[in-house]
Amino acid sequence: MAHCPLAWLLSVSILLLVISVQNSQARLRDKNGEKSAVFLSPEFVLEPGSVVNRYYHNIDFPRGHIAIKNFNAEVVDEAGNPVPLYETYLHHWIVVRYYQRKGVEMSKDNTDVDFNNSDIITAGNNGLCNRSLPQHWGLGSETRKTATHVPDPFGIEVGNQAEIPDGYEEIWFLNVHAIDTRGTEDWLGCTECRCDLYNATTDDNGRPLRPDYVGGMTCCHHDKQCRLREGFEGAKRSLYLRYTVKWVDWDNSIVPVNIYVLDVTDKWKRSGETTGLSGKHDCQIEYDIKACSTGMAKDGCTDTKRVSLSLPTGGDVIYGVAHQHTGGIGSILYGEDGRVICTSIPTYSEGKETGNEAGYIVGMSTCYPQPGSVKISDGETLILESNYSSTQTHTGVMGLFYILVAAPSPKPSPDIHAPFEVRYYPVFQSLSLTFYRIKLINLNHPGDIFG
């Protein structure tokens, strides 16, 4: 039989494509010692109007005692092409660290995660809503244009064996919540999980919804279907969350940071006279925006929600960013004295290309204060403010705020860092050469002479 070069090349191309999808890790080492790896989540399949909300356990992740410097993600198709938001809306993705008992096998693909299982211990973040918001990282539609890098000399410490309970190992899970909006009757209503568009009357456990619950994640859980335009047909397709992690090996020169995830729906109240996490945090995660009255000018239609919170341990703010949904116009984190700690504003696009989809939040501005310039005191009362346009009703919106906080730098000793003056004292002269004795004079304490 004669060989067909075209067919042979096509078969090789398909084989290479399959290998590239299955091989979910590619590493490189930068000159400064920073390592980078690109991973793929397990495959998830969507068709027009469908929803995926999966928890993938024991995902590919860098191992060892390291400092994470960057984490970002996006939805791609089988060929590795980024998928636009107007086709697949990325409601959110989160990555959570936990400890799993050694020798225990768990399903890698679930629609829920059970932290009441004694074989699992959540490591979570540093607060404040660790039960409901335990993630180290998490974004949504804004993921492609939101900075997440941790500046030097700081890093997010993971893989420290001293912190892992005996008999357990450090594991990571990924939650992906995505909605296929191709051909939907109301794309915004589908992305806001309006219950009527999903024909939802019960939650994912079969319990009836509250009469006043009109939209939110409970109505767009895994395998739900949003209403399509009559006669619309579209193909199923396989998708992945492609995530890139950058890290360096841990050493004593790296300053660890605490991760705090704040929620404007938190019902926390300070109890007693202590500071920090003295009261129970009850984060609702979502809330609704009611449309303003018809007689109000559009530029005055703003819904503002505030909450008072307190961190158990303060320090230097290294990074800050908010997470909002469509309709969001920005969040502000204030200190107890009214100073602005960080303002995070959404970017809305007007284009059609991937990463610039009209009508969607495609990025959030971030804060990178000069280290030591923005501080939070232990137990300080903070005010989190989330602002949304209320020109129309919005359901299931969020008002989260991520901050990285490092322990404050120790105050320098006045003697060690005092200004010095170099003085030269002639000792003797020989021919054309003069020999000097050099002394350092502490100008704050002129009596202190070195040399």
Image: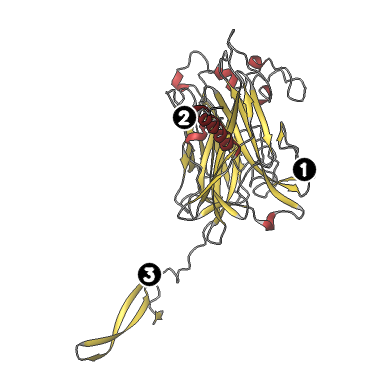
Residue type at the position of mark 3: Pro
- Of labels 2 and 1, the one closer to you: 1
Q: Amino acid at mark 1?
A: Glu
Name the foreground residue: 31 vs 114: 31
Q: Residue at x 55, y 35 (%)?
A: 16
Give the residue pinned by disc 3.
419
Measuring 52% from the left and 44% from the top, which residue is drawn there? 335
User: Whole-Å distance between the Cαs marked 1 and 3?
Assistant: 62 Å
- Which residue was labeled with disc 2? 355
Query: Where is mark 1, residue-wise?
Result: 105
Q: Is residue 372 above or below residue 105?
A: below
Residue 259 x/y as whole percent: 59, 46
Residue 32, placed above or below residue 230: below
In the shown orientation, is residue 57 left or right of residue 398?
right
Q: Quadrant of the N terminus?
A: top right
Decide which of 251, 256 is in the foreground and name it: 251
Mark pair 2, 1: CA separation: 38 Å
Judge the density around disc 1: few (<14), some (14-19), many (≥20) Cα neighbours within 10 Å. Answer: few
Please indicate, yes or no, whether residue 153 appears anywhere in the rendered image: yes
